[in-house]
Amino acid sequence: MAGSARKRIWGWFFFDWASQPYSTLLLTFIFAPYFSEVARAHFASQGLSAEAAGAAAQSYWGFGQTVAGVTIALLAPILGAIADGSGRRMVWIWLFSACYVVGAFGLWFLIPGAGNLQWAMLSFGLGLVGMEFATIFTNALMPGLAREEELGRISGSGFAFGYTGGILSLVLMLLVLAESGATGKTLAGLPPAFGLLDPDLREGTRTVGPFVAIWYMVFMVPFFLWVKEPRFTGTKLGLRASLLDLGHLLRSLPRRPSLFAYLASSMFYRDALNALYAFGGVYASGVLGWSVTRIGLFGIIGAVAAALATWLAGRIDSARGPKPVIIWSAIVLIAVCGVIVGMSREDLFGFAFAPGSAMPDYIFYVCGALIGAAGGTIQSSSRTLMVFHTTPDRATEAFGLYALSGKATAFIAPALITAATVASGSQRIGIAPLIGLFILALILLIWVKPKGERQA
């Protein structure tokens, strides 16, 4: 592989490294449980019981995810069609990178007791929209990176590299910045930022937003230096023509059964997976009573498992194709959801733990490793299989449609969790609908060709 091609691939990898902390630190392991703590205290101050306050906090978080998901679903395919029609993708990456950074910085202002939950959700949603849209346009650059038979390995290596960045960022947060609400010290036993931040105001934990924003700005530099806009060889289309072309693609889906089934399947399993990520930290905080730092350790275990699994699965993907990786990943995630639903601090499927037993903690650590491994591999192989259903000149439109399929029903998993949580009054039972979504996704995969539409 030529040096310039290798540098371009490494530059593309750096987007995963730069953006992964949004998922690792904000969506799952640091900000989400911190938001849960603040929201639970807010609702408890209004007279709700501890369990009802936890359910209300989870429902509020779910509503925010739903709004962001609908926004992404409505705009993703339109922006993808416009970008492909103009032949320009990098300008969109710049724009949505700005949304990512501004949204992440805004999370600093979620102060305990201030009651500004709306501001926090607005900032989080802006950053999440920025991350998702930037991902669409960087994924669209993937077909031009290497030969088809190398794409699985490249996708897996990119995810592994990104998870490694997530691990490093999480370790830095836990050791230097994020304080325990009980002790006011970091995992290393230090005052946050070596005494520069006030633990009573949770300033160490609140720096997670600015930290993620600065991390992204620094590590996107190699991407913008080494990844150039691919030469556009097609016919440039105006806005109206681009939207007409998108309409033609949508109308053609019933005649493209493999693509149609794949988009529907991925719609359900990615919706369920994103909800599992989003609610995992909230579950650990509300059901098991874990602190932010303990949830962070859980995150490190999951991220290490994800890095190793995606690197290995990328090799399997290149050798055997992406579909088997997706199937086995979904099966593992179904099993994990079953354990989460059946476990409380007191028992597992009715089998009681000894009083004060640490067994539920150990079990959930194992669940975290499996979620990280299976979640990483299913995402890595999913983008490879999407490439097999498109062409380089229409890749942004295709990944916009892929984002639509992932977000068109993004309200379903959070809404089902919210409804199940409210109806049962239990955060555990609230996770149960995810099992059905994963099973439905597996059924739809029956109609997906292993090599997509490139299969003879």
Image (spheres, rainbow, N blue to C red):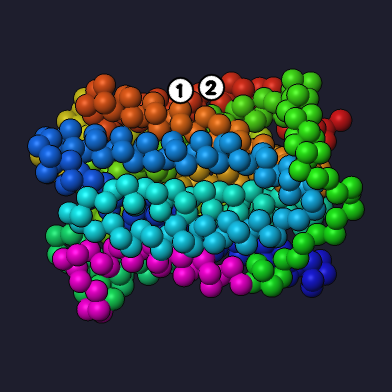
Q: Residues within 10 Å of mark 1 (few under 14, many from 20)?
A: few
Quadrant of the rendered image containing residue 197? bottom left
Q: 336 left or right of 439?
A: left
Q: Is residue 418 above or below residue 221?
A: above
Q: Is residue 9 above or below residue 245?
A: below
Q: Position of residue 29 (x, y in %)?
A: 35, 53
Q: Residue at x 37, y 36 (%)?
A: 63
* Residue at which label 1 appears: 436
Check residue 219 for magenta coloring: yes
Q: 347 left or right of 167?
A: left
* Number of numbered labels in the structure image: 2
Q: Are marks 1 and 2 in contact (CB under 8 Å)?
A: yes
Q: Position of residue 342 (x, y in %)?
A: 29, 28
Q: Quadrant of the C terminus?
A: top right
Q: Amino acid at mark 2?
A: Leu
Foreground of the two, 12 or 199: 199
Q: Quadrant of the N terminus?
A: bottom right
Q: Residues within 10 Å of mark 2 (few under 14, many from 20)?
A: some
Q: Is residue 59 above or below residue 252?
A: below
Residue 221 appearing in the image: yes
Q: Identify the mark at residue 440; answer none if there is no mark.
A: 2
SS state under label 1: helix
Q: Residue at x 20, y 55 (%)?
A: 114
Q: Amino acid at mark 1?
A: Gly
Q: Which residues are magenta?
A: 194-221
Distance, label 1 to label 2, CA atoms, is 6 Å
